[in-house]
Amino acid sequence: MLEINKDKKTKVAVVCPLLKNSANALFVSDEKAREAEAEGLVLAMGQEVVLLQTVKLAGIVPKSFFGKGTLERLKDECLQVDAELLVVDMPISAVQQRNLEKILNLKVIDRTAVILEIFGQRAHTNEGKLQVELAHLTYQRGRLVRSWTHLERQRGGGGFLGGPGETQIELDRRHLDERIVKIKKELEKVRKTRAIQRSARVKVPYPVAALVGYTNAGKSTLFNLITHADVFAKDMLFATLDPTMRKIQIDKNCDIILSDTVGFISNLPHELVMAFRATLEEVLEADVIVHVIDVSNPDYKEQRLDVLNVLHELGLSKIEFEDRYVEVFNKIDLLSDSEKKNFIDKIGHRTVALSALSGEGIPDFMQLLKAKFRKKTKVKNLTIPIDDGKKLAEIYRTAEVLERRDDGERIFLRIKCSS
Ligand SMILES: Nc1nc2c(ncn2[C@@H]2O[C@H](COP(=O)(O)OP(=O)(O)O)[C@@H](O)[C@H]2O)c(=O)[nH]1
Ligand SMILES: [Mg+2]
């Protein structure tokens, strides 16, 4: 795991390598969108971006990933902005990482490590945590294979890079393998008992709306805008437990929890797919799923379908979609008037176009949420002791009281509340 100081943000330089003549080196079709995503990942990790650039490469240098010229320039630029960490937005080998760190005199991590860090910070459930740990161990294990130095040494290349000897690597590998086996067993167990665990889990006492969508779609911006605008967010019942969950009042007598989630990531390294899906399992438990789409991203259509496919694969049925799903076309402030009209025209009973930055369309979004949750309200009969003022106050705050009478000992209530 990365050693990150919780009180102070780490200054991060982000480099997106772009390989010439290699189609699959492109994660997304647009350089700017890719940079934005790489930046978004570092922000999601809770750190600060001080340098962000795309570097075009003719090829990868086996020893140090980048060539000499690029490295000299990078070193200079990192120094100028006081960078403390370099993120390479592509997988790099352990050897390349070690050499880059030496040359640049900076800690260096790759894209996979960044994503692992985010998942590690955000995994809540047992299964999620185990999946992330498994992915982490697999990643570490892969990085023990020093194929390049090994070859160099066989060829008489010197082995000047240092690092652990082969015996140490064998030991480390065995140790990792043992832990991997152990975690896989635990995962099996967790999966078997998952149904039981779910029902036993402390239920959040309010209905939940979960934000999903690609990294950089604007989920956190929307989350912050809505939860800060609302005075009821201030008593942040769950803020201490989890900063990605906040209570908001969307209507009189209707409090809900809004939950920000780990974003979808383009070209997710395959060893992280299971860990990511485990984090999404929680989303499926939400009462309403809010899919945030960045319509200014040239890939937004593919991304949208991607999210829908994964939600379906995870078990969200088409029928459920009707009342549990809301689609938000975000960043309409970046569109031309005619483009914008296109989205406004599509607004329906489960879609809304807005800008989380300018606030345009936010009232429509709140209306839509309200409508989704209104459907979920139920009428219930309750009886409470007449001297339980606290409970009574709570009921009045969270529900609509339709009828009230008492017999001197008990209060009988007929209320309308969210399920
Ligand atoms: N122009 C514009 N930028 C936005 C809007 N919403 C979010 N952003 C920007 O998009 C970037 C990613 O937003 P963020 O909320 O972190 O995305 P997340 O990864 O989905 O949580 C940030 O730089 C935001 O300022 C919007 O409506 N319009
Ligand atoms: Mg976010």
Image (cartoon, rainbow, N blue to C red):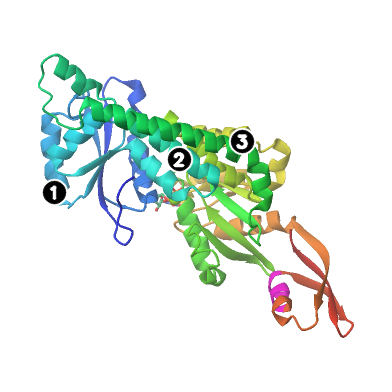
Q: Which residue is mark 2?
A: 132
Asked if residue 225 lies left or right of residue 324, the reply is: left
Q: Amino acid at mark 1?
A: Leu
Assess disc 1: are there few (<14), some (14-19) or many (≥20) residues with their C-alpha within 10 Å of its C-alpha. some
Q: Which residue is mark 3?
A: 314
Q: Which residue is mark 1?
A: 79
Q: Amino acid at mark 2?
A: Val
Q: Amino acid at mark 3?
A: Leu
Q: Residue furthest top?
A: 155
Q: Residue furthest right?
A: 407
Residue 376 in picture, x, y percent from top left: 74, 56
Q: Nearer the viewer, mark 2 or mark 3?
A: 2
Secondary structure beneath disc 3? Answer: loop
Residue 234 in picture, x, y percent from top left: 51, 71
Task: Examine the rendering and report whether any part of residue 266 can be seen.
Answer: no
**Magenta segment, which residues?**
393-398
User: Quick one: label 2 or label 1, which is nearer the N terminus?
Assistant: 1
* Residue drawn 27% across the image and 29% down it: 169
* Residue drawn 47% across the image and 31% down it: 181
Q: CA distance from mark 2 to mark 1?
A: 33 Å
Residue 377 in picture, x, y percent from top left: 76, 59
* Residue 116 belongs to magenta span: no
Looking at the magenta stretch, what is its main secondary structure?
helix
**Where is 315 relative to 235, above or below?**
above
User: Quick one: label 1 or label 3, which is nearer the N terminus?
Assistant: 1
**Where is 145 relative to 368, above or below?**
above
Q: Nearer the viewer, mark 2 or mark 1?
A: 2
Asked if residue 236 lies left or right of residue 348, the reply is: left
| Proximity of marks 2 and 3: CB atoms separated by less than 8 Å | no
* Residue 396 belongs to magenta span: yes
**Where is 311 relative to 154, above or below?**
below
